[in-house]
Image (spheres, rainbow, N blue to C red):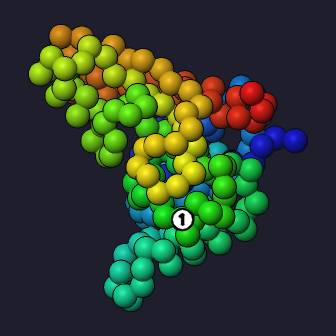
Amino acid sequence: MPARLAVLISGNGSNLQAILDAIRLRMLDAETVVVVSNRKNAFGLERAARAGAPTRYHPLKPYGEAGRSREEYDADLAELVKEYAPDWVVLAGWMHILSNAFLQQFPYRVVNLHPALPGQFPGAHAIQDAFEAFQRGEIKQTGVMVHLVPDEQVDRGPVIATAEVPIYKSDTLEMLTNRMHQTEHRLLVNALQRLIEGD
């Protein structure tokens, strides 16, 4: 039985595409049972539709406008995702920090991809932060990690896989970003397959 993946995205969806491609090429024993975006125009929704994966749009803005809390948003998001009975929930460029209202519905089954090594550069600007740290002479390389999300800490949790990414003197931020994305795509697929196999 292929593992059932719910993938949460906010943007372009290149990591989602890596998952979809790996499934199509039988490199990942899984199926994408739903792709959820908090942004209506996220290109990842188009990628999902092309691959025949169900898509859902779950915006935060109406909650704020109605005076409803982030916890209510996350609880409703959890209910939406639970409709698809996923084995794993994969955060592939999901730009919200999830509260326990969501996480407690999927204990140790939420997987996050973060473009930094464990304990380094948490948050949404990790690649830029690493690039600037390199320019200051503080680091020689950065990397990517895939980890479980057991609680509300940002970019922390049991690490499933890491990969180091060198930074070169000739790099621009764009060059480093491209190399990071290539590493992300590989690492995410490998980490998911390890989780599915129970390694």
**Percent coordinates x, y for residue 195 in the rendering:** 71, 35
**Percent coordinates x, y for residue 172 in the rendering:** 19, 21
* In-front residue for pair 40/179: 179
Regarding residue 47, the answer to whether it shows in the image is: no
Residue at 77% over, 32% down: 198
Q: Count numbered badges in the picture.
A: 1
Quadrant assignment, res 55: bottom right
Furthest toward the top, the residue is 169
Furthest toward the left, the residue is 136
| Residue 131 vertical position relative to residue 158 in the rendered view, above or below | above
SS at mark 1 in the image: helix
Quadrant assignment, res 132: top left
**Percent coordinates x, y for residue 119 in the rendering:** 38, 34
Which residue has dot 1 on it? Answer: 100
Which quarter of the image is occupied by the C terminus? Answer: top right
Regarding residue 59, the answer to whether it shows in the image is: yes
Residue at 57% over, 73% down: 75
Furthest toward the bottom, the residue is 66
- Judge the density around disc 1: few (<14), some (14-19), many (≥20) Cα neighbours within 10 Å: some
Which quarter of the image is occupied by the N terminus? Answer: top right
Residue at 49% over, 64% down: 99
Give, as a three-letter code, the residue at label 1: Asn
Horizontal side of residue 18 vs 107, given as left or right: left
Residue at 45% over, 63% down: 38
Horizontal side of residue 23 vs 162, given as left or right: right
Horizontal side of residue 129 vs 8, given as left or right: left
**Percent coordinates x, y for residue 117 in the rendering:** 41, 28
